[in-house]
Image (tube, rainbow, N blue to C red):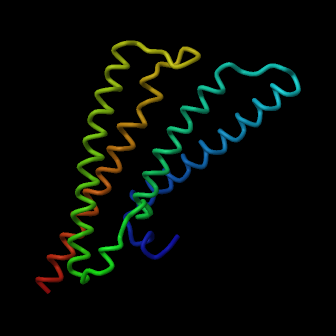
């Protein structure tokens, strides 16, 4: 754990560890399920019918949890050729603008994903093995909603810090 992480409140550190743990658990489960399915098919010419659709769902979960962790670590893909030419003040303004834009877009995606999941629930769609589709799809609005919240919080902190520097 780095100094920046230890300076955060305990609840935030717990949530970060929870994100990381979920990601590791799902990836490990994917490895075990895929390996088991390969062994079953090659050695016993059999397999579990639910494993392949479950692995596809797990890829979705890993992707969105990974995006959430990337947001936390500020490791999303960026094109910063122009920002390197800006003064530190303009760099901060640029970061605020781009993070605010990402927060709004992520929030819109979360909103529409939530509408999609509600529709799936109302239709009673089944993914596999009797599991309703909407339960497995919850990661979409939750993931994008958390990404949006994280970006909004980051923007608020940067604005607060920028105003604090001007006042001081």
Q: Of all residues shown, which one is farthest toward the right?
A: 43
Instruction: Tell me: 167 left or right of 53.
Output: left
Residue at x 29%, y 81% (from the top left corner): 85
Q: Which quarter of the rendering shows the C terminus? A: bottom left
Residue at x 27%, y 52% (from the top left corner): 103
Q: Quadrant of residue 25?
A: top right
Q: Quadrant of residue 152?
A: bottom left
Residue at x 23%, y 49% (from the top left corner): 104
Question: What x and y, as percent, mark residue 91?
Answer: 26, 76
Q: Quadrant of residue 74?
A: bottom left
Residue at x 39%, y 43% (from the top left corner): 143
| 92 shown above or below 135 | below
| 121 shown above or below 143 | above
Q: Of all residues shown, which one is farthest toward the left?
A: 167
Question: What x and y, as percent, mark residue 15?
Answer: 43, 53
Q: Nearer the viewer, residue 13 or 158?
A: 158
Question: What x and y, as percent, mark residue 70?
Answer: 45, 58
Q: How many numbered badges does the structure rendering display?
A: 0
Q: Nearer the viewer, residue 2 or 155?
A: 155
Question: What x and y, as percent, mark residue 53?
Answer: 59, 26
Q: Nearer the viewer, residue 76 or 15?
A: 76
Q: Of all residues shown, which one is farthest toward the bottom?
A: 168
Instruction: Tell me: 128 left or right of 111.
Output: right
């Amino acid at each position: 754990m780095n100094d920046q992480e230890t300076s955060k409140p305990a609840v935030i550190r717990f949530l970060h560890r929870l994100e990381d743990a979920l990601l590791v658990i799902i990836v490990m489960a994917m490895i075990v399920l895929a390996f088991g399915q390969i062994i079953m098919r090659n050695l016993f010419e059999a397999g579990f019918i639910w494993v392949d659709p479950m692995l596809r769902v797990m890829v979705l979960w890993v992707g969105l949890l990974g995006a959430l962790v990337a947001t936390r670590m500020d490791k999303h893909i960026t094109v910063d050729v122009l920002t390197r030419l800006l003064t530190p003040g303009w760099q901060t303004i640029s970061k605020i603008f781009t993070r605010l834009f990402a927060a709004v877009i992520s929030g819109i995606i979360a909103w529409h994903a939530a509408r999609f999941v509600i529709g799936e629930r109302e239709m009673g769609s089944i993914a596999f093995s009797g599991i309703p589709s909407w339960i497995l799809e919850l990661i979409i609005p939750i993931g994008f909603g958390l990404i949006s919240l994280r970006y909004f919080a980051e923007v608020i902190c940067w604005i607060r810090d920028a105003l604090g520097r001007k006042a001081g």
